[in-house]
Image (spheres, helix red, strand yellow):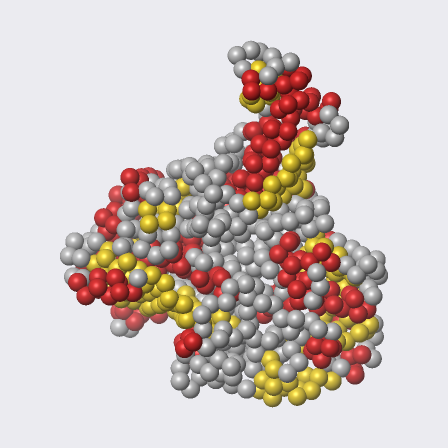
């Protein structure tokens, strides 16, 4: 049966996965493999005086013990940030020397200082406890606000004020002029929580060193080619020497976009021992060593005229970088700052990023990668401005919203939106959420002793960028002599349902039965190149690449079709999966032609869409708060999204559902916390609060597609849409619920204790 674009289709992947028949990295096996345990620093900052490995080396089952001196002798290298922003005061941007094992200094709890290789994981763990690490502790700094103080401990002597980089964007003079003429000014400071990904499948790597000098690596990732390149660079070898395979991946969300030291160490240990090496993170190791995300303090100011029109914004972001750089730590903080403009006509915006080193784990993209934070700032500022001026929250948004007739629209900061109908989407959401009936629901909740609030946000995000120079992707298409279709993609699947989606695209175009389509991805030896899956880019980039490859195959076969139909090539057209002589009923199928050809037909394309896209939408969240306990419940949640052409409505809704939950997780409790000495206080599920299905309502998710013209499918992307809007909608709802008590703002996370304390403070009790 041929599938159609726009048709809901259950995922083909699920039958295998729900039966436990998937092949994750932990399911792979290599003969004679050994286990690796990582010895980590117990302090956040200090000088390594000695590492004594003698007892560990004599422990049962131990094959080898390696330290930072061994790694340095073999030339293992630190990861390098792809983007090197301007450092302050004209000094050079400082990139720390951070080889995979630290030999001289440690700079956060969990810093790797040695590895133990043993026959079993239990033996490796036991021996790792025998490694004696002598460290002279130093004072630590764990937040950007601490790092910027005059007497703050220095993470690096080469960065005398802990300020890694300072990057300014926008028209400062225009903003200053607008502020000077404004009738109303609104200012606020927004602390944004530090998170980590908490994948269902912890990180695993299984690495083998081959006799020809190549490495064969199994791991979970959304970007196999990026992983291979980063690992090769750290090992000091050519990319072609590294094969990365990722068959199934239990969650990634940006965290597995680039390699970690453990992958490099496993490869190196495999070469040193001559045996395959496996490392599997414990959950506590994951909290320590997986990349963190989001944390920053944002200071925002908005200038408005007497009628509530946005005139200008000043924004200063102060993120905590952590001690080291991942490949895209800096890029995460800069590439999506344009989202602070939102869907509004603010003429002038000036934004400054001041990024500080801290004695914490490094940061990386996490679902949204800067977009939720920027949407949170503009949508909270809209509410605060409405409250100060005395304008309805919806009305102030409508008054400032970009309209379809203004497209393409150049925002006050960085982005140019190509398409969208923001007012219509907001209206549809308000109707679906019964915004007009909220007052009655609030009154009813009051009779039960509950505080009820409603929040709105209008998120927009860049996808498939950068704008103007979007990154390419690889797609290959082959039609074999037996009539089978093979899709080959450079984008990796980490749970999104790529097999289903791309079968659907191909089936719709070629009218081929989905059972006759084979999907190949996740192996750098089979797929020659690729960028990966992130930033809601896959459909707009890999989908576009597949569409181009499909056109190339059609052009290849067209001459054969003309010969078979005894027609001039210019009279042959491709319609409904068959070649047809225009104006006649004479036709021939592509599979029929492939059967008669020498080798079938094949084409591949490496390229980008015409430009980035801008998925957008509107979220409305309703909450109820028990003032006696501070417990908050989400009672209604409504979303209308414009993700362009919808390939599979069922999968889009699934993506949005998951994204909403991840956003609300940050609203209600997810937070990585270090104490003043740099000790990690949230190293298990006892301390790190995850969202639960039984604490959430059924979501209402509707679509309002406005196709884009910048790629062949008209799709904009959906993977991050739910998260980008949920953070602001959730906090806005909580602030609205607390507003009768005189509380105008509440900082995340809204844990019961923090909400209860805010209520007690407001009541003076």
Residue 2 or residue 627, whichever sits in front: 2
Q: Residue at x 44, y 79 (%)?
A: 147
Residue 156 or residue 17, whichever sits in front: 156
* Number of on-image labels: 0
Residue 535 or residue 189, whichever sits in front: 535
Residue 529 at x, y percent in the picture: 64, 49
Q: Residue at x 64, y 54 (%)?
A: 225
Q: Is residue 381 left or right of residue 633?
A: left
Residue 657 at x, y percent in the picture: 48, 47
The residue sitting at the top extreme is: 584
Q: Is residue 360 visible?
A: no
The correct choice, above or below, for 713 with respect to 75 in the image is above
The correct choice, above or below, for 571 with respect to 13 in the image is above
Dividing the image into 4 quarters, which one contains the N terminus? Answer: top right
Q: Residue at x 54, y 15 (%)?
A: 582
Q: Based on the displayed image, in which of its 4 quarters is residue 311 positioned? A: bottom left
Q: Residue at x 67, y 42 (%)?
A: 520
Q: Is residue 69 left or right of residue 254?
A: right
Residue 352 at x, y percent in the picture: 37, 67
The correct choice, above or below, for 262 with respect to 25 in the image is below
Q: Is residue 115 left or right of residue 361?
A: right
Q: Based on the displayed image, in which of its 4 quarters is residue 476 positioned? A: top right
Dividing the image into 4 quarters, which one contains the C terminus? Answer: bottom left
Residue 348 or residue 457, whichever sits in front: 348
Q: Is residue 534 visible?
A: yes
Residue 386 at x, y percent in the picture: 23, 56
The correct choice, above or below, for 697 with respect to 647 in the image is below
């Amino acid at each position: 049966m041929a599938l159609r674009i726009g048709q809901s289709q259950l995922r083909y992947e699920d039958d295998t996965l729900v039966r436990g028949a998937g092949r994750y990295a932990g399911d792979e096996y290599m003969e004679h493999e050994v286990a690796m345990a990582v010895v980590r620093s117990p302090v956040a900052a200090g000088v390594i005086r000695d590492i004594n490995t003698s007892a560990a080396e004599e422990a049962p089952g131990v094959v080898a013990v390696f330290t930072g001196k061994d790694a340095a002798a073999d030339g293992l290298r630190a990861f390098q940030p792809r983007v090197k922003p301007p450092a302050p005061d004209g000094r050079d941007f400082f990139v720390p020397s951070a080889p995979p094992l630290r030999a001289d200094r440690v700079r956060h709890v969990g810093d790797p200082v040695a590895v133990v290789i043993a026959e079993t994981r239990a033996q490796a763990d036991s021996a790792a406890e025998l490694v004696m690490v002598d460290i002279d502790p130093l004072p630590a700094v764990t937040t950007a606000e601490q790092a910027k103080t005059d007497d703050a401990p220095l993470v690096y002597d080469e960065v005398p004020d802990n300020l890694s980089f300072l990057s300014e964007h926008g028209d400062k003079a225009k903003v200053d002029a607008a502020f000077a003429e404004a009738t109303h000014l609104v200012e606020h400071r927004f602390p944004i929580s530090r998170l980590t990904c908490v994948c269902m499948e912890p990180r695993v790597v299984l690495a083998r060193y081959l006799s020809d000098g190549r490495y064969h690596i199994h791991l979970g990732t959304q970007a196999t080619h990026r992983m291979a390149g980063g690992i090769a660079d750290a090992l000091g070898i050519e990319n072609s020497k590294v094969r990365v395979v990722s068959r199934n991946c239990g969650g990634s969300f940006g965290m597995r976009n680039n390699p970690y030291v453990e992958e490099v160490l496993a490869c190196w240990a495999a070469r040193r021992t001559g045996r395959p090496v496996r490392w599997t993170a414990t959950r506590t190791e994951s909290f320590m060593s997986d990349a963190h995300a989001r944390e920053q303090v944002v200071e925002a100011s908005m200038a408005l005229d007497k009628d509530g029109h946005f005139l200008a914004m000043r924004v200063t972001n102060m993120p905590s970088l952590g001690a080291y750089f991942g490949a895209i730590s800096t890029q995460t903080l800069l590439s999506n700052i344009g989202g602070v403009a939102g869907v509004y006509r603010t003429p002038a915006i000036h934004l400054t990023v001041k990024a500080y080193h801290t004695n914490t784990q490094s940061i990386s993209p996490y679902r949204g990668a800067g977009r939720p934070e920027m949407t949170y700032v503009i949508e909270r500022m809209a509410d605060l401005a409405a409250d100060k001026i005395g304008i309805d929250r919806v009305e102030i948004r409508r008054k400032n919203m970009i309209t379809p007739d203004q497209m393409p629209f150049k925002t006050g900061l960085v982005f140019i939106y190509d398409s969208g109908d923001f007012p219509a989407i907001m209206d549809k959401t308000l109707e679906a959420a019964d915004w007009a009936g909220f007052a009655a629901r609030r009154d009813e909740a009051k009779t039960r002793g509950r505080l009820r609030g409603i929040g709105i946000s209008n998120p927009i995000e860049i996808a498939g960028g950068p704008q103007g120079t979007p990154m390419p992707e690889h797609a290959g298409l082959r039609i074999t002599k037996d009539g089978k279709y093979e899709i080959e993609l450079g984008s990796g699947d980490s749970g999104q349902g790529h097999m289903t989606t791309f079968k659907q695209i191909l089936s719709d175009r070629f009218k081929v039965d989905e059972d006759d389509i084979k999907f190949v991805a996740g192996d750098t030896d089979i797929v020659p190149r690729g960028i990966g899956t992130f930033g809601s880019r896959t459909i707009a980039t890999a989908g576009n690449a597949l569409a181009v490859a499909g056109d190339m195959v059609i052009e290849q076969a067209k001459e054969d079709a003309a010969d078979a139909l005894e027609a001039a090539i210019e009279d042959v057209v491709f319609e409904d999966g068959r070649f047809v002589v225009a104006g006649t009923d004479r036709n021939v199928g592509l599979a029929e032609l492939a059967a008669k050809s020498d080798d079938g037909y094949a084409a591949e394309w490496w390229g980008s869409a015409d430009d980035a896209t801008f998925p957008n939408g509107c979220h409305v969240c309703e909450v109820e708060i028990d003032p006696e306990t501070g417990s908050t419940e989400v009672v209604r949640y409504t979303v209308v999204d414009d993700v362009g052409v919808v390939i599979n409505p069922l999968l889009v809704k699934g993506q949005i559902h998951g994204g909403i939950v991840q956003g609300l997780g940050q609203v209600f409790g997810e937070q990585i916390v270090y104490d003043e000495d740099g000790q990690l206080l949230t190293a298990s599920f006892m301390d790190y609060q995850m969202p639960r299905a039984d604490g959430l309502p059924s979501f209402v998710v509707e679509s309002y597609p406005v196709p884009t013209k910048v790629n062949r499918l008209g799709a904009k992307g959906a993977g991050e849409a739910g998260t980008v809007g949920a953070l602001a909608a959730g906090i806005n709802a909580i602030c609205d619920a607390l507003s009768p008590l005189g509380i105008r703002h509440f900082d995340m996370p809204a844990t019961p204790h923090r909400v209860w304390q805010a209520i007690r403070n407001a009541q003076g009790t």
